[in-house]
Amino acid sequence: MTGPNITIAVEDLVVHAGSKKLLGPISFELPAGNALVIMGETGAGKSLLAQAILGTLPDGLSAEGIIHLNGERIDQLSSQQRSAFWGREVAILPQEPWRALDPLMIAQSQVRESHRYVAGLSRKAAKQATATDFQTLDLTGAEKRLPSALSGGMAQRVAFAAATAADAPVLIADEPTKGLDAERSHTVIELLAKVPREGGTLLAITHEASVAKHLGGELLVLKSGDLVERGATKQVLAQPTADYTRELLDAEPQVWPTTPTTEAGEMLLEVKDVAVSRGERTLLQGFDLTLLAGERIAIAGPSGVGKTSLLDVLAGLQIPSAGTVTRSNQVSSTGIQKLYQDPPAAFPARVALGKSLKDVARLHGEDWSKVLAYLSRLGIDESLLKRRPDEVSGGELQRISIARALTAKPAILLADEPTSRLDPITQRETLAMIADIAAEKGIAVVLVTHDAVIADKWADRRVVLSEFPKRQY
Amino acid sequence: MSNQAILATLPVERRFPIWRVLGIVLLLFLAVCAVMGPDLIGVDPFKQSLMHTLQSPSAEHWLGTDHLGRDMLARLLSGAQLSLSLAALSVLTAAIPGTILGIVAAWRGGWTERGLTLFADAVLALPGLLLVLMLAAISPGSWWALYVGLSLTLWVEYFRYTRQRARVVLSEPSVESSRLLGFGPMHVVRRHLIPEIGPGLLTIAAFGAATAVTAVAALGFVSVGIRPPTAEWGVMMTQLLPYWREAPFLIFQPVICLVITVLALHLSVGGRKL
Amino acid sequence: MLQRSVFWSALAGRAVQAVVVAVVVGIISFAMMQALPGDSAYRIAAGRYGYDMMDAASADQVRTELGLDQPVVVQLVSWLGSLAQFDLGKSSVSGSPIAEELKTQMGYSLLLAGAGLLVSLLIAIPVGIMAGLKPGGWFDRFSLAASIFFRAIPAFAIGVVLMLGFAVHTKLLPVAGFKGPEYLVLPALTLGLGLAAVSSRVIRDAVSEAMSAEWRLFSRTKGLSSKLTLSRHVLRNAALPVVAYVGVQLAFLIEGVVIIESVFAWPGIGHALVHAIFGRDVPMVQGTALALGLMYVVLNLIVDLTCHGIDPRRSKTA
C-alpha cells in the first residue's frame, strides 16, 4: 500500500469532537524529499492534522483513519506508544517557539539535551554538536541566554535545533512564521525549504500563501476542516480552482489592487525635527512630517525602530525628546483617535461592548442611531454589542473599534498595526474599509505596519524608518 | 511583591457553582443571627443558674447550658454578634482606604507609590496576628484594640492587590483609548478599574472576614483577647474545655459555629483565594 | 547561578525589615508599659528589689535613674536606644534575664516550626502532585474539598479536636508540655494540617500548569521521555511558585506557632509571649515578640535566596 519512499501516508483521516466533525476526510501520501503544505485560515483545523498524526490531540477529540509513518501503521498506537517516534522519526517544530522553550533553562542546554538523550550522543559529542548548531543557525552569542532574552526569530531557530537534533527524516512545522516580521520569517522559511532539498520530508502548516510558495511541493487547502482544493503548490497558486483558494490568494498584500489616491485637504498636523526616545535610548531623530486632511500615510519599518513611540508622539500621548508637533485648530482635543494592534486590549475588558459605545456616544453628543449606522456599514450586527470584548472575534472587534473612533468625529486616525493579528482575508477587508471611510469623511490616517508591501499598496505616501544607528562610544 | 504576583496569575473562576450558593445562604443566615443576636430567642446570655449547670439539650435550653447554667444558644448567638460585627467593621475599615490608596499609588506612581508601598510593607513586617496580639495587649480585653489591630493588618492586602491590578489595567491600551476619546479619570475608575478589581476585592473581603473571626476566637481562646464573662466563641471554648468529660457536646458547639462561619465565608467566594 | 549583587540586595531588604520589626515591637511594648496601671517606678523597683525590700525612696531612685520623670518622647527614645544595644532587660515576673530564656525557648519553637513545615510538605507534596497530574479527576476534587474543609478549621480548633479525640480519649499520645519526642506529634500535626490545606492546592496548581505548558509538550515531542521531561523541566518550573508560596505561608507558620504552642503548653517563644501578655510582663513581651519577628525575617530571607537559586531570570534582572 505504501511505497518504499513514502514517509507519511494518511488515508481518510477524520477528527471529531464528540459527534461534531472538525476535520477531514483527508488522504495524502508524502514521499521522502518532498514537501506538503497545508493552507487555510485560523480555525480551519490545520493544526488538528498534525496533532492527529503525532497523537497529541487535546482531550475530548478523537481521530479515525489510517496513518503510516515510515512504513509502519501508527493510527492504532496510543499517544504513549507514538511518543517513541517523536524527535527520532518525526521532528516537530512548535507554534510560538517562545512558549515552547523551558523558561528556566538556557538556550544551549535545551538543544544539548536533545543531542544527548534523543540522539544518544556522549556528553562531549552532544556539546560539540550543539556548538555546531548554534554556529550554522547564526545563534552565536545566544548560548547562555534564557528564552525570555531571545527574539522571536532566535527562539524559533533554537527550537528548530532542539527538535531536529536526532535527524528525524520527517519535519512537521505548525505555523512556523507566526508572530515573526517579514525579515525573520524569511530566514525561517529558508531553513524549512532546505529540508526537502536535503532529502528530508516536510509537512508545513500555514495561513500565508507566500510561505506555501517558498516551500513548493504539494498543497492542500482547508476551509473549516474540509479539503477544498489540492495539487502541486505552484499549480494551485497560479491557477486556483476553488473560490476559497482564490479569496485566500487575493488576500495576500502582493496582489492587492492599489488603493486609489485621495485628494488631500488642508494641513492638520505638522511634525518638525522630532526626536523620539524610549528610556535612555534614542529611537528616532530629525523626523519631519506634514499630515493633510484625507491623506493616508504608512509608516513602515522593522520591529523595535520606534514606530509605536512615534505614533504616541503624534497622538500627544508622549512628549518628543526634541522638536515640535503642532496641531491645526481644525483638530479638537479628541480629534486624534487611535486603533490598536490587539483589539481586545483596547476595550474595557469586563464591560459589554454596547455599554462602552453608548458611553462614547453620550460623551460626544452623538445619536445612538448614528453609531448603529456606522456599525452596520462596517458589517457588525447589533446583537454582538451584548457581548464582552473577549467574546467576539478579533476582526469584528477591530471594526467595532473603528466605529467607536468615528463616534468621536476625529480628524486624524492613527492605526498601530491594526490588522497584524487578523486573518489575511479579514485584514484586507478591514484596511479597505478604513480607506473608504477616511476618504469619505476627509480623515487623515497614519498606518503603522511592519509589512512594506501593505504600506506600498494601501497608502498615498509612505515613510520607511530604519534602525537608528547605535550610539558609538 | 513577587508572591502577590504569583497569586494574581492563578485563574479566577467565573462560574457560579452550587457550593457558592450554599456559602451565600449560610452567610445570610449567620448575618441574621449576628444582627438579632440573643434577641432572636429572647434569652439573656448572662443569666446564671447554678442549679442547672451542664445540662443536655432540652425544650427549655435547645443547646443545653454551660458550667454556670447559662443558656448555650443565647451565648452562641451573642458570640456570633460579637465576632461577625467585629469582622464586618474591620473589613470595611480596611477595604475603603486600602482600595483607594492602592488606586492612588498605581495612578500617581513615583514617590507616592514608593512611600505607600513602604508603609504597607512596614505594617506587615511582623506577621499579622502577632501585630494584632501586641496591639490587643496594650488594652487587654477591649474589643476596640482588636478592631484597630485587625483593620491595620487587613488593609494591606486590599492595597497590594488593588495597586498591582490597577497598574496592569492602567497601562492597557483600553485606558489610553478612553483618555483619547475624552473620558476623565472617574470614567476610568468606573468602567476600567472597578469591574476589573471588584470580584477580587470581594474575595479578599470574605477571606479577611474569616481571618478576623478566627483571630478573635484564637486570641480569646488563649486568654489574651476578649475576656469573660463576654460570650465569645474562643473564650467559651476555654471555659468549657475542663468539662469535656461531663458534657462533651458543649465544647464542640463553639467550634462548629466557628467552622461554619469560616466555611460560609470561604464558600461564598468560591472557596479559593486569588 | 546566584549572583553576588542579588544576594546583597535580598539581604539588605530583609535587614531593613528586621529594623522595622524591632522599632514596631519597641514602640508597642513601650505603649504597653505606659498603659499599665499604677506607678511604673514602683513596679520596676519591686521587680529589682522584691516587694518586701522596696520603699518610696528606692522608687524615686529608679525614677531618676531611668528618666521616668522625663517627657514621654524622651523616654521612648531611651527605650528604643536600649533595644538597639540588644539590652532586653529582665523579666518583671521571674526576674531572670530575657535573653537567657529566649535561647532555650527559641530551640523549641524552631523544632515545632520545622516539624510542622515537614509534616505539611509530607502531606501536601504527594497530594498536590497527584491532584495536579489529573486536574478535575476524582482525587483532585476530593483533595479540594478536604482543603476547603481544613482551611475552615482554625489551627487552635484543630488542636483542641486532636487533643480531645486523640490523646485524652485514647491515651495514645501525650497532650501537653514537652518531655520527649512523642510530645511533638500532636502540635506538629496540628500545624502541618493547617499549612498543607493551602499548600497542597498551590502545589496542585503549579504541577497542573507545568504539565499543560507548551514547553512541556515540546520537551516530549522533541524526544525526551516523560521521566526526563519531569526531572529536567517540570519539577523545577513547578517548584518555583511552591517555594515562593512557602514565603507567603511563613506568616501563617509564625502565627500558628504562637497559638498552637499555647494550646499544647509547648515550652516555646509563642507560649512565652502569650503568657507574658497575660501576666503583663512587658520586657518579656518585647523580647519574645522581637524573637518571633526576627525568626520571621530570617525564614523569609532563606525563602528569597532559594527562589533566586531556582529562578535564573531573577538574578539577571535584579
Image: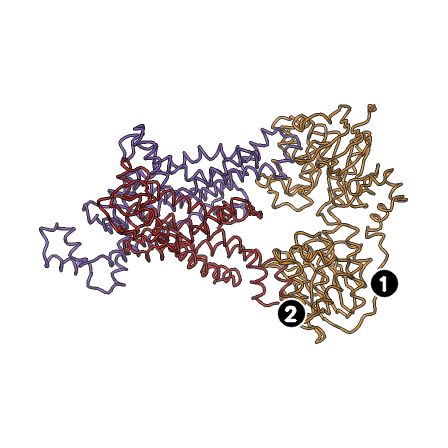
Chain colours: A orange, B red, C purple
Q: Which residue is at 38% across, 34% downward?
A: C189
Amino acid under disc 1: Pro
Q: Is residue C196 above or below residue B270?
A: above
Q: Are marks 1 and 2 in contact (CB under 8 Å)?
A: no
Which residue is at the front of the view, A184 or C210?
C210
Q: Where in the figure is residue B156, as x and y percent of width and height?
A: 44, 55
Is A152 situated left or right of A253 in this image?
A: left
Q: Which residue carries the number 2 mark?
A: A363
Q: Where in the figure is residue C65, as x and y percent of width and height?
A: 17, 58
In this figure, what is the number of numbered marks?
A: 2
Q: Nearer the viewer's eye, disc 1 or disc 2? A: 2
Q: Is residue A266 above or below residue A282?
A: below
Is B261 situated left or right of B249 in this image?
A: right
Q: Does the image show residue A338?
A: yes
Q: Is residue A322 above or below residue C310?
A: below
Crowd class of label 2 (few under 14; some 14 to 19; many from 20; radius 10 Å): some
Q: Which residue carries the number 1 mark?
A: A260
Residue A158 quadrant:
top right
Is B53 situated left or right of C166 in this image?
A: left
Amino acid under disc 2: Leu
Q: Where in the figure is residue A459, as x and y percent of width and height?
A: 80, 61
Q: Which residue is at 51% across, 56% downward?
A: B162
Q: Does the image show residue A320?
A: no
**Which element carries disc 1, helix, strand or loop?**
loop
Between the C-alphas of marks 1 and 2, the distance is 34 Å
Chain on which label 2 sits: A
- Taking the view exactly as shown, the residue that stands out farthest to the front is B59
Chain on which label 1 sits: A
**Which element carries disc 2, helix, strand or loop?**
helix
